[in-house]
Image: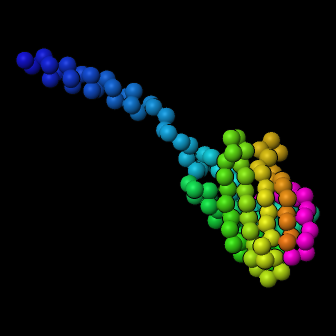
Amino acid sequence: MKLIPSAILCLFLISIPALAQQPSGSPSAESAFGALPGRWVRLQGGYVITIRAVDADGKLDASYANPRPLPFHTAVASKDGNVLKLSFELRAAGYNGSTYKLRYDAANDRLTGVYDQVVARQTFEVVFVRDKP
């Protein structure tokens, strides 16, 4: 009779290490978006996007300077396969509704994409490089 509880205990103890080694269901925000935090300087004009953090849903704690600080109305990152996409919207005076649509280029550690300046009705190809202190 004592054999059955002992066998159950042994099976339980054997299965614990196997459970601990199972991969989690999805990558953490830190691993998925870990390359994004930093100070990014636009090659065309010196505008700056500073990304302080990214939450699990891709919401960016970010700011913009041109050269004076301007708030982002929205700042989000998403993952499309292996591609990290970033979307920023400005609603400050003179920029109302202007957007940056960027992609992270891991091979070159840069952000590339399009800036749509809706007030001036102009679109620009842009590149941001990481400012290395």
User: Which image quadrant: the C terminus?
Assistant: bottom right
* Foreground pick, 98 / 12: 98
Whether residue 42 appears in this view of the structure is yes
In screen coordinates, is 18 left or right of 47?
Answer: left
Residue at x 58%, y 50% (from the top left corner): 29
- Where residue 34 sits in the image (x, y, percent)? 65, 50
Q: Viewed as shown, does residue 63 lie left or right of 118?
A: left
Is residue 91 depicted above or below 62 in this figure? below
* Placement of 42 over or under 95, stated as above or below: above
The answer to whether any part of residue 70 appears in the image is no
**Is residue 58 one of those drawn in magenta?**
no
Which region is colored magenta? 119-133
Image-quadrant location for residue 67: bottom right
Residue 7: horizontal and vertical position, in percent? 20, 19
Closest to the observer, 96 or 108 = 96
- Spot occupied by residue 123 in the image (x, y as percentages of width and height): 90, 64
The kind of secondary structure the magenta stretch mainly shows is strand
Is 131 contained in the magenta span? Answer: yes
Drawn side of residue 121 relative to residue 11, left or right: right
Q: Residue at the location (45% across, 31% down)?
A: 22
- Counting the numbered discs, the total is 0
What's the colour scheme? rainbow
Image-based side of 113 in relation to 9, left or right:
right
- Dividing the picture into quadrants, the one containing residue 86 is bottom right
